Image (spheres, helix red, strand yellow):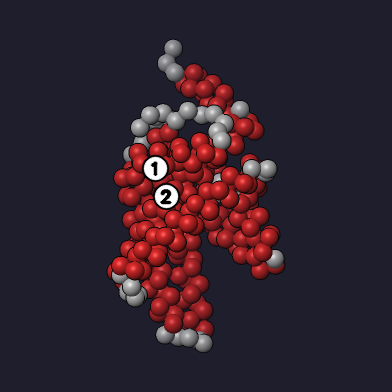
Amino acid sequence: MPTYELRARSVVELLDASFLVLRDLLVAGLALYVAPAALIGALADAIYRRADDYAGQTEATLLFLLGTLLATAGFAVAGYAFNHYLAARLVARPAALAGSARAALARAVPVAWTEVLVVLLVLGGFVLLVLPGIWVLLASFVVLPVMVVEGTFGPAAFQRSRALMAGRKRRVVAALLIWIALDVLFDLGLEALLGGDGPLQDLLYGLSSGFLDLFVLVFSYLLYLDQRCRKEAYEIEHLAQQVEAAPS
């Protein structure tokens, strides 16, 4: 794929670039995110169904928490792997699927812990009032790129994402509305074709959701680059790094 041009972009340009990048990296996305996420989602759903057998008992709560933790941590680590590969390909650095997978596994604990923290903050905001939950969701939109590029985790990653997203949350709303619309259409189509519940249905739902999640992952990474270009002249910093690293 061509090297991505680092510069500030409009919302329309970001959406268009996201679809183009996703088209070029679809196979990598399938290997690093969609397939693992589908398996993790199917396993989490199996745990939830098992929890239904213990309705009203302590075991049901524990199984529900286990399934939620597995899904939250697993999706985050898979997303980190894809973002790691994406970050390298966009600037024409050497990239390998196995290398990105190893990088994600090596940082699985801090990545998972950061994602759990963000989810708890979002849920806490929705429990208190709806608007704080929405604010936290939008403020944390580029947490994953922050972890990949800057190696920052935990509360510091959330604070960094919040600072970058300050004043630019409408861009996230646009992407999320498109994602929700596509997700609803995919779910309705699969339900009409397959109907009912079961392992096969869960796997196919997971695959469709995984492809839509890829779009959000790409958009969030491009938005991260866009915000750094707008606020920190990141394109100049990156160019200086390339010149410095070039052989004399």
Question: Residue, x 70% and y 66% (percent of image)?
Answer: 129
Residue 117 in the image: above or below residue 128: above
Residue 29 vs residue 221: left or right? left
Q: Quadrant of the C terminus?
A: top left
In which image quadrant can residue 192 be found?
bottom left
Q: Which residue is mark 1?
A: 22
* Residues packed near mark 2 inside 10 Å, few (<14), some (14 to 19) or many (20 plus): many
Do the numbered discs 1 and 2 sit on residues whose CB atoms are within 8 Å? Answer: yes
- Of 164 and 188, nearer the camera is 188
Residue 30 in the image: above or below residue 225: below
In which image quadrant can residue 232 be found?
top right
- Of 114 and 201, nearer the camera is 201
Q: Which disc, if any, is residue 237? A: none
Earlier in the chain: of badge 1 and badge 2, it is 1
Q: Which disc, if any, is residue 214? A: 2
Residue 180 in the image: above or below residue 97: below
In which image quadrant can residue 133 be found?
bottom right
Question: Residue, x 40% and y 64% (percent of image)?
Answer: 187
Residue 8 in the image: above or below residue 203: above
Residue 132 % position (x, y): 69, 59
Residue 209 % position (x, y): 40, 58
Residue 1 vs residue 5: left or right? left
- Tell me the amino acid under the disc marked 2: Leu
Question: Residue, x 48% and y 86% (percent of image)?
Answer: 55
* Residues packed near mark 1 inside 10 Å, few (<14), some (14 to 19) or many (20 plus): many
Question: Residue, x 51% and y 79% (percent of image)?
Answer: 61
- Tell me the amino acid under the disc marked 1: Leu
In the picture as drawn, the residue positioned furthest to the top comes out as: 248
Distance in Å between CA atoms under marks 1 and 2 = 7 Å
- Mark 1 lies on a secondary structure that is helix
- Of 248 and 242, nearer the camera is 242
